Structure formats: C-alpha cells, structure tokens
Image (tube, rainbow, N blue to C red):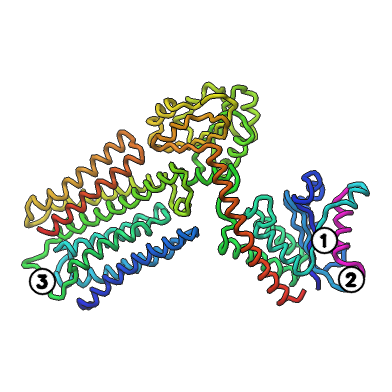
Amino acid sequence: MSLICVGINHELAPVELRERLAVPSEAVGDTLLSMYSAAQIGECVVVSTCNRVEVYAAAEADSTIPPTTQVIDFLKTKFAGLNEDALTELPLYHHEGLDAAKHLFRVASGLDSMVLGETEIFGQVKKAYLIAQETGTTKGRLNKLFQNAFRVGKRIRTETEIQRGSTSVGSVAVDLAEKIFGGLKKCNVLILGAGEMSRTTAQSLASRGAIGIRVANRSIERAEALAAPLGGTALAFDRWPSQLPEIDIIISSTSADGYVVHHEQIHGAIHSREGRPLFLIDIAVPRDIDPAIDELNNVYLYDIDTIEGIAAQARKKREKQIALCEKVITEEAEEFIGTSGA
Amino acid sequence: MEITAQGAWWALAGAIACFLAASALAILEVSKGMRYASLITRVLMGAGFVLETLYLHHQGQMRGRCPITSLPEILVFMSWSTVLIYFVVGPTYRLSLLGVFTAPLVALFAGLGLAGGAVTGIPTPPAGIVDPWLETHASVSLISYGAFALAFVAAVMFLIQDRLLKAKSLTPLFYNLPPVSYLANAVTRLLLVGMILLTVGIVTAFFIHVFPGWGKILVAFPVWLAYGILLVVNHRRKLAPQSLARATVVLFALPLITLTILGRR
C-alpha cells in the first residue's frame, strides 16, 4: 500500500484560494466518506486549517489510476468551484512514500507552519486524525503513520528548542505579562490609540484570559470600533489617567509626536495600586511613554524595539534548530517506512 | 529504631549530598535552556528531609530531649525546619525553582552543623524532667526561623526576577523563575507564617515550669519585633514588593545572629 499526501498551503496559495478549499470541521466527516468512495483509496485523513488543506491517504499501489491523481482530481472537483484555468493552475503539492511521512512529521512538529515551531498545528492534526478515526476512514497504515507523527512532534518539542521562545510582538507581550502577573485572568488592559499592533497585542492577551479591555482614543468612534470585537469598552482619551488604579497592562500606540504617558502620572498612581505591578508596552514610534517610567519600582516598561528584538532572537534560535529537527524527522520517517514497508 | 553515631553522621552527610544534588541538577538543566522539572528537586529534598530526620532522631535519643542543645545541632534543626516549611507551605504557591534556591541554604546550615560536630556518640541526658513547654518553645521558635529562611529565599528569587525583567534579560533562568507577583505574595505569606510560629514560641516560654531566664526569651524578641514592624508597615503603607523583598533579605541576618547566641548559652 502506498502512502500519499496532497495539499495546498500558505506558501503556495493566497488566502483567497485556500479559503475556498478549506473544509469546516463539521463537514470533514462527509468529505472523508466522499473521498473514500470516490477515489480508490483504502484510508484517508483530511487536515484543514486556515493555512493548509491536506489529504493523507493510503492506497493500493497497483490502482489503474495513480492514487495521487485520484486525490488531486477529487480535490479539484469537490472543493474548487473555480474555472478551468484556475483548476489547472491550482498550486497543489504532492508527496509519496517516505516524503509523505516526512511531510506529515514536519507539519505536526510546526516546521511547515507560517510561524516556525508553532504548537497549535499539533492539536489541529490530532483533531483531524480523530475525526477520520471516528468516521472509519483510517486503518492500520494511517493509524500507524499518525501515531508516529504525534510521537515525533513530542520528541521534537522535548529534544529541540524549535518551539521555545515567542516570535511575535503579541506572544512576547503575553510571555512578559505572565512573568509579571502569573495568570492573566484578573488583569485589566488599557489600549491607548487604535493601532493594528495594539489590537493584535490586546487580542493575544485576551486569548490568555486578560479581561476588562478598555480603549482610549481621541476619536471615540475608533475606540468603540477597536473595543467591540475584544469585548471591551471605549473611553475618551483624556479620561485614561483615571483608569490607572485598576489597570494592570497599558498598550500604547498613538500617533502623537511626544509622550502621552508621563512619569508624574504613573508615579502619582503607584500608591493607589496597592503594590500591584504595572506593565507598559510602548508600540509607538516615536515613543508614547516616557522611558524614565521604567525606573519606578514595580513598573515594567517595554518598547517596540525591545519586544521586536526578543521576538527576532527567538526566531533566530528556532531557525538554528531546523537542521536538528530535520535530522530527527528523517530518521523517524525512514524507520517508519522501513518497518511498515510503504 | 536504633541509629548509631556513625549512621547518624552518614545520614546527615547523605542529606547534604541530596540538597546539593538538587541544586546542581537544576543549574545544569536551566543552563541548557531546558524547562526544569521540579519533581526531581522535590524527590531529592524529600530524601534529604528523611535523612535529616534520622539524624535528629539519633541526637534526640542521645540528648533525651529535642536535639537543639548546641549551635551545630541548632543549625541542623534549622535546615530541617526550612525543608519542613518548604514541603508544608511551599506547594501552595507552586513556585518553580523554590526548592532549587532553598537547597543550597539548607545544605549550608546542615554542612556547618556537621562540620561543627553535630553528631554525638555519647548519651548526655538532661538532669531532671524535660519540660514539654520548654521543648515546644524552643522547637517552634526554630521552625519559625525556617519560615523566615524560606521567605528570604523567595525574596532573593523575587529580586533576581525583578532585575531580569528590568534589564530585559530573557534568559533561561527568567523563563524558569516564577512570576514576580507569585514571589511577592509568597514572601508576605511566609513572613506571616514565621511571625505566627514565633509568637507561639515566645508565648509558650511563659508557661515553662522552671523559667529559663529572660536572656533566651529576649534573644528572640528583636527578631519578632523586627519582622512584626515590617509586616505592619507593609500592610499599612503597601510597600513596593522590591522594598519588602530587600527588607526580608536584610532582616534574615537577625535570626542568624540569634542562632549563634542561642548556641553559646
């Protein structure tokens, strides 16, 4: 039985194309059954995320039509709704045998992700496999392949540093906040200005439980537009200092020329905070927050250069791990193929 | 259970080895940038605690009372108390690396005790009846010092993590140390535990049948007063955690000084 992988991902296709091929999780089971009966394949799993749609299949090697072609044809007809030219030029990749195994191991380990080493994909691959298992479209071959993929993913996580450190401004901010406050569930966040990076940073914090998001902007409408999707509240910009006794994290990204957060404002508010730390993230250029504030006890100020530097360092460290990860993956894939005979 | 003097010596030496191993392993793992698994530390600290208990059992049998009759014995008891507080109170805070930072301190106390001749081979029971109030006063007071020692450790960890955050130095140690908020809370609560225990220790002194004299009582009083003032000031003025941590580190000199005085009397 031959092992194949056919797919499309963020490297080859823009989001407009990927979203047309994506399969909602509630429809994966039906898709698997359709593919199972339409193509001459013995087993199949569909992995569909925002950055990829992939089909893993095991098929008889002596099929009249090559299994890879069958799966590609299925994808083109079932998901596309595109015109003939677009169908022909669909940027699908395909792997067989050892390469298919290696590809899955790379995907499960986060090596093929938009953010190198990200860990969310592991859970997504696991979920896709469980759906296929429940649907009954996996048997010995793919069961063994995916079990190995999960084991390789864990091995990569423990033996390498590919998943260490945070590689985006938002995730660095979350790491720092967690090292200051521990859990973020009781943290109140104030956003000054309405920049895109403020929004994504606040979103990262909110995803880890930060509550009470308040947005202060000179335009109350823009503040409301930013606050609403985050479940927060908007306030007039000149009212933000009154929030200091309750706020734990301030993210500032205004277009002001000078400082909008001054030393005296923070110094004056410290006693009302009853010993609670204050974390300030200055994403603006030129800076919004007076750097002298960092000298205050129990106040931690990080500007965009520092945060970007931390993220860049983490990205570099991850990249250095690629060779080690590829070595582990090749070794595991060769052992898998050797013992299962693809 | 009969333990020979030689057995007690090896038990104490083994305890010190366990504590040092706990630290050394953690330093090795953290320096490799790995997330440190605290289970290893807890196992080694637990083994060290059991071995110190065996030593204390032997000494208790030799002395016919709680083995805190000399400075070396007091130092070992102090080490044992600190580990006891670590196991009883420490898990509440789930502070990673707390054991790792505590281990060298308890190893130092136990090591100084062992080097100072903490093991006795000759039974020297006290003349007369052993007063349980005296035993309670002395042992509870020393256990309170264990809490102050752990507060000292948590304060040191806080100051390190605070410094790393201020310096923007996100090293492997930074990622393994607990959040500063957790450490600040732990310092306050450990100081409270120490104060409660020391208060009990001092109060029980007034129930001793044969009053030992004001000397030994007054030795503990400055410690009680100093930590008490710190806690009251912190409560009323909401000290910055950095100030509380620095004061906790400095104040720990007081229990250490009183230990040397107690050991001589």
SS for dot 1: helix
Callout in the foreground (2, 3): 2
Q: Camera-side residue: B114 or B121?
A: B114
Q: Which residue is mark 1?
A: A33
Q: Which residue is mark 3?
A: B124
Say whether residue B256 is magenta: no
Residue A16: x, y in percent? 80, 44
The residue under the point 17% across, 57% down is B138
For marks 1 and 2, the one nearer the N-term is: 1
Name the image quarter holding the C terminus of chain B. bottom left
Q: Chain of mark 2?
A: A
Callout in the foreground (3, 1): 3
Q: Which residues are magenta?
A: A64-81
Q: Which residue is mark 2?
A: A63
Q: Where on the picture, by quarter, is residue A278?
A: top left
Number of marks in the image? 3
Q: Camera-side residue: A299 or A205?
A: A299
Q: Where on the picture, by quarter, is residue B212?
A: bottom left
Q: Amino acid at mark 3?
A: Thr
Q: Is residue B7 above or below residue A246?
A: below
